[in-house]
Amino acid sequence: MAIARGRAGEELGVEVGAGAEAREARQVARRRAYRAIPITIGLAMIVGMIVVAIAAPLIAPFSPSAQFSTAVLKGPGAVEGHWLGTDEYGRDLLTRILWGTRVSLQVGVLAVLVAFAIGVPLGIAAGYVGGGTDLAVMRFMDMLLAFPTLLLALLIVTALGGSLTNEILAIGIALTPNFARLARSLALSIKENDYIMAARALGSGQTRLMVRHIFPNAMYALVVVGTLYVATAIRTEAGLSFLGLGVPPPTASWGNILSEGRQYIKCCPWITTFPGLAIMLAVLAFNLMGDALRDLLDPRLRGD
Amino acid sequence: MLQYAIQRLLIAVPVLLGAMTIVFFAMRVLPGDPCIAMMGDEATKEALADCTRALGLNRPLHVQYGEYLWRSLRFDFGESFRQGYPVTQYILLMFPHTLVLVLASTVIAICVGLPAGILSALKRKSPLIDYSLRIFALLGLSMPVFWLGILLLLVFSLRWNVFPLIGGGDLERVVDMVKTGEAIGEPADFFASVADVVHHLVLPAFALGITLAATVSRLARSAMLEVIRQDYIRTARAKGVREGFVVYKHALRNMVIPLLTILGLFVAIALTGTVLTETVFTRPGLGKMLVDGIGARDYPLVQGAITVFTMTVILVNLVVDLLYAVFDPRIAYK
């Protein structure tokens, strides 16, 4: 008899009947199975992206800079071998999109690593040490946070000039305050634990405490959020490239293929359609993965 | 309450000054020389020196910095290097375009995103509703606004020819007519102008609004989930209050605080969105002005645009902080 068991301590629905418990068990199982879907799809897409990025020279049908004078601005499949069509220089669109995966993935992952490497130590120090350190670090982060991510990245990349490295640095710096804030709040709650007090009583210094105890305990939450920020970084990269401030041509990036294709939007919409689709799928992959990981971390966001 | 307000204001001021400092120094380490950008590589040394002097770029950095801060506080961003007219005038001209875009897309984002997020949270036990809403939100979140913009242009402007391809309509005329009272005198003219502006606004506002709606619905979903788990909701249900009543009277009202947080985040995201949206729709506005200014290495223009954007974000967050205290008096006493 399942009577008012208050699933997950909330709804006080009264169920009557012998099958109720079994039905509930089936529902829970089904929900669990549903939950595995997004993480599987996200992971598969990310693995796919990594494979494409690494193997681009092998799987791309042509060289990304090869120009085919006989196939300028041809639609998908119009010319044998050019499955997604060609651009204004007669370059194969599929090849360029496959190579563009490298730029997006590199910027996405490395920018987040930059933000992580700067933001996390600062945030942990601010949260753990407190006082003046906290005030100084967080006020500076507040200043950076006053800029919307794309605007700050735009400002930095304009100052440094457009290149792959500068783009990574710019987006990395723009994302830094987000990591610093999270690391600080994690450090604040972790430092209240008994094991921290125990470690301190055993004579651990501040640095050792932060590196050996606080950081490892904050790691999981930081990685989850990091995954979501890879999505933000990829989207920001595409935005910068679209505005003409990303990796300079002729290097193929999804944003600059799309931006160059805008002039030909009337005759040749495929040049803008396919790279946009690639951006969306890449961002979606990391969002799916990050969301699923976050749900695991924070059960309150789950459905059940 | 007053003490809290003053405290918040005192925090906002240094943040604003710091953000302006970042803008100034970032612009000054720009690799390109604005004079070379304007006059081309063939310019003589003398001409370049003249240009540098005329623009005041030869003065010590701290003097330029001091002047920039002092003038910015009075909303004087100097003169555009390229066109020579005051940046403030340009900003005032562009601001209404960006404002209507932000407002229209906000309305769309809230009308679509808020109900979707709330429904998703309330129906979280129904995989069909919750999951499909969440998938739509994820797709919206992952879709770059400039790509959605291009797709909309492809279908509605190029194929069906129902919406204009570029421009923002004659918003200045609408504003003028309101100012001079012509709007009442010649209503037919006025409505034609308004219709023209709206006609130009539909696609950009929809593109930006839909991508923003995704963010709103995700934030609303987690805010609702947070509220619905509170003890008072369980108590209300235990008392036998009808579900609809629980949602309206207890849950929605308590969502105000989390929703305010959304507003703060939202403005920053929306402003970023206008930069890309205005560029893809070739629409006048602050974002387009910023992008053009960067291309032309027009320091004052870029500084002005970014300063206005940043001021807006800081100001909105200040207002949000103050509203928190209004809606939840406990916050002011913490």
Image: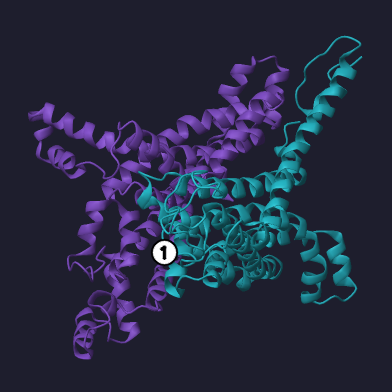
Chain colours: A cyan, B purple
Residue at 58% across / 66% down in the picture? A172
Q: Which residue is mark 1?
A: B16
Q: Residues within 10 Å of mark 1 (few under 14, many from 20)?
A: many
Q: Is residue B334 visible?
A: yes
Q: Residue B193 placed where, x, y %?
A: 18, 34
* Spot occupied by residue B284 in the image (x, y as percentages of width and height): 27, 50
Closer to us: B329 or A265: A265
Q: Nearer the viewer, residue B149 or A157?
A: B149
Quadrant of the rendered image containing residue A259? bottom left
Residue extending furthest toward the left = B185
Residue drawn at (26%, 64%) of the image: B74
Picture quadrant where residue A97 is located: bottom right
The location of residue A69, given as percent across then percent down, is 43, 59
Q: Position of residue A234 (x, y in %)?
A: 57, 56
Q: Name the residue: 62% across, 21% down.
A: B246
Residue at (12%, 26%) from the top-left corner? B188
Q: Is residue B219 visible?
A: no
Asked if residue A21 is positioned above or below residue B179 in the image, the reply reads above
Amino acid carrying mark 1 in the image: Leu
Location of residue B39 with respect to A87 vertically, above or below: below
Q: Chain of mark 1?
A: B
Quarter of the figure with the N terminus of chain A: top right
Report whether A142 appears left or right of A292.
Answer: left
Left or right relative to A301: residue A36: right
Q: Residue furthest top?
A: A17
Disc 1 secondary structure class: helix
Identify the image quadrant of the C terminus of chain A: top right
Apparent side of residue A208 relative to residue A239 in the rendered image (left or right)? right
Q: Disc count in the image?
A: 1
Q: Nearer the viewer, residue B52 or A15?
A: B52
> Which of the pair A52/B232 is nearer the observer?
A52
